[in-house]
């Protein structure tokens, strides 16, 4: 299993599942920060499918986001989850299906069933950590 720092250093494409269009929401703030750090953000939220957030098309599903990247020979490196803990196992299954590199459950989100599923399929798993906070810690150490 890779460390948080290794996951963040290797990632290029981050699917943000449950991304909101409201700038005050954590999902929007984290995605904005990550985009400014050079990551490609792929918003995933069926409520906003077809619209644009942060200049990127919003996808209804992870599969849709993965299919877009596949056209350029790329894949989803990290699935960043902003959903209720009980909804994460289905996201984990989708992350496995699209062969994502990691399943990342944001601060306050933990689901052992989802973590076990993802790990068994070879994905790196992070629970209860904020990508923005962890990236800033990494940048401070550099």
Image (tube, rainbow, N blue to C red):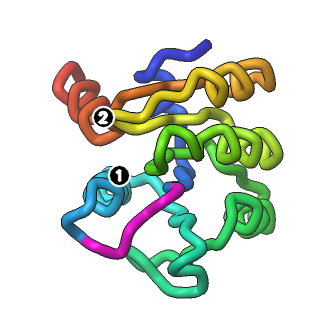
Above or below, 19 against 109 in this view is: below
Which numbered circle lies on residue 34?
A: 1
Where's residue 68, x and y in %? 72, 69
> Could you tell me if the residues under marks 1 and 2 are in contact, i.e. CB atoms within 8 Å?
yes
Where's residue 42, x and y in %? 54, 63
Residue 71 occupies quadrant: bottom right
Which numbered circle lies on residue 135?
A: 2
Above or below, 11 against 45 in this view is: above
User: Crowding at label 1, few (<14), some or many (≥20) Cα neighbours within 10 Å?
Assistant: some
Quadrant holding the N terminus: top right
Label 2: state its secondary structure: helix
Q: Left of 110 or right of it: where is 75?
A: right
Q: Left of 90 or right of it: where is 104?
A: left
Please give the count of numbered marks on the rendered protein. Answer: 2
Specify start and end residues of the magenta stretch as a single range: 17-22
Where's residue 53, x and y in %? 42, 77
Main secondary structure type of the part rendered in magenta: loop
User: Crowding at label 2, few (<14), some or many (≥20) Cα neighbours within 10 Å?
Assistant: some
Please check the rendered image and state whether residue 20 is part of the magenta-colored stretch, yes or no: yes
Please check the rendered image and state whether residue 103 is part of the magenta-colored stretch, yes or no: no
Q: Nearer the viewer, residue 138 or 29?
A: 29
Where's residue 84, x and y in %? 47, 46
């Amino acid at each position: 299993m890779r460390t948080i720092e290794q996951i963040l250093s290797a990632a290029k494409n981050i699917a943000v599942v449950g991304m909101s269009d409201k700038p005050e929401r954590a999902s929007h703030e984290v995605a904005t920060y990550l985009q400014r750090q050079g990551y490609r953000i792929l918003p995933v939220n069926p409520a906003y499918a077809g619209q644009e957030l942060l200049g990127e098309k919003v996808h209804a599903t992870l599969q849709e986001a993965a299919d877009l990247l596949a056209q350029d020979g790329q894949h989803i490196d990290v699935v960043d989850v902003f959903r209720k803990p009980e909804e994460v196992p289905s996201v984990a299954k989708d992350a496995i299906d699209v062969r994502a590199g990691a399943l990342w459950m944001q601060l306050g989100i933990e689901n052992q069933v989802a973590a076990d599923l993802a790990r068994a399929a070879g994905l790196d798993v992070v629970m209860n950590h904020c990508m923005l906070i962890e990236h800033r810690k990494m940048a401070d150490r550099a």
